[in-house]
Amino acid sequence: MLISPSDTDDALRPDRLEDYFRDGAAPADSLLWWQLESHDALQAALRALFQGPVGLTRLRLWVFLELMALRESRLTREALNQAFHVLRDEVLDSVLKRLREADLLAWDATGQTYAVTPLAQQLVGLLQPLAQDQAPDGDLSALLAGVAGAHQLGTLQPAHLQHLLAQLSRLYDEFADAIASGSEFALRRARQRFERALTLVDRAGEALAAIMAQAEASGDARLERLARELGLAQARLLAMASQFNRALQQADRQRVTLGSTGITTTDVRRWLQHLGSEGDLSGLLAGAWERPVHPVLVAQHDLVDTTEAEFERDRPQASGPMVLPQGQAAPPGELMVLSLPPEMAQMQTLLEAWSAAGATDAQDLAPAVLGGSYARAAYRAQLLPLLGDVQARHLKGATGDMARQPWRVRWSAEQGEIDDEFVAWMSRGVLIPESSS
């Protein structure tokens, strides 16, 4: 006789729920069991969605979540057909029937419309994580968000803190195992997750502090005890940062640099791990294991001869103390004074010559600027704003002499080509005597 697995499960399934327990009665003193009993409708809805093969379960979840995302409060069959046009009609009918049987969807025969039930609105809150991207440390972030949100809405229950405490305890044990392992790679992986966990706890720190203060003021003994344990778990995580630093420093001290190449044993290990995931490590030997090891045997008299030769070998003599050199007279030096470029003196000579000749008309700007090279012309053009500068007139030296020249520059908006070896294009301008300006 052949027995299928389903027949075996039916044979082991008791007739009553109490038959699962040793005493023949449900644990009446368990608060969690009582809470589960009060949510029979929600459990039945979950069974209706998740019962069956994997593909069918995913189909029901997709239809349910898409249905809950629709904004219309009353949905006709035409609207559902349009929203789920990718499904065959018989498949959509089957899923809608299952949702109606689970009391997740209500049918109004008078208006010929579908409506979402309050049970469905309660269920979608439980299934919301299935419609979100899985982020790193999503378990801790979801618990922290649930605790902080429940506190803000005033619906915080001891079960929220209990689950968060359990997750923090598991994380602490995981980080402690990584520190005890001494593995550098395990430490660095655990350190990254540890820093993310600290960031999440720090962001929720204000809400956690408010929860602890509220628990102490409310007088709820269980909530107050859980809040104190939550603060202790948070302090244990914060104190673990120094343990990570000491373990990483110990791992750094054990790292060995291979010769003068700068390559460390950590680099070799990381390279071998990367190579092991993509290739065959045995290929690195390249047939080396086929060559036998040849031992080198040295006799005693060979060792004695080598030692005697080493002692008798000529060695360089250590150099004796060196005498300090005799004092010498310092060579004569000259004090070099920084002088200004000769272009300034040349421009001042030209302006003084114009003044000495009694020039009263405006002079073309090109002779004062051009000549020599492009760099010299550019330098002379930068000296022109010094002419007539009020502040520079009081200075001593060539700069003050340049500012005291009786000439003023007047640029024009016109530009054009000029006949010069080094400058091809220049703005027009003139130099005007101070008496006529």
Image (cartoon, rainbow, N blue to C red):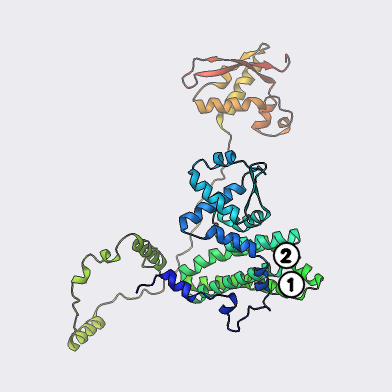
Amino acid beneath label 1: Leu
Q: CA distance from mark 1 to mark 2?
A: 9 Å
CB contact under 8 Å: marks 1 and 2: yes
> In the orientation shown, which residue stands out farthest toward the top?
361
Res. 156 mark: 2
Looking at the image, can residue 349 be seen? yes
Is residue 212 positioned above or below 130 on the image? below
Which residue is at the front of the view, 54 or 250? 54
Q: Secondary structure at mark 1?
A: helix
Q: Residue at x 58, y 34 (%)?
A: 340
Q: Residue at x 78, y 67 (%)?
A: 214
Looking at the image, can residue 337 be seen? no
Is residue 162 positioned above or below 130 on the image? below
The residue to which callout 1 is attached is 223
Res. 200 mark: none
Quarter-of-image position of residue 384: top right
Dot 2 crowding, Cα within 10 Å, few <14, some 14–19, many 20+: some
Which residue is at the front of the view, 29 or 301? 29
Residue 3 % position (x, y): 38, 72
Is residue 106 positioned above or below 381 on the image? below
Q: Residue at x 67, y 41 (%)?
A: 111
Q: Secondary structure at mark 2?
A: loop
Dot 1 crowding, Cα within 10 Å, few <14, some 14–19, many 20+: many
Q: Residue at x 72, y 13 (%)?
A: 436
Residue 264 % position (x, y): 40, 66
Residue 329 % position (x, y): 50, 57
Give the mark nearer the N terminus: 1 vs 2.
Answer: 2
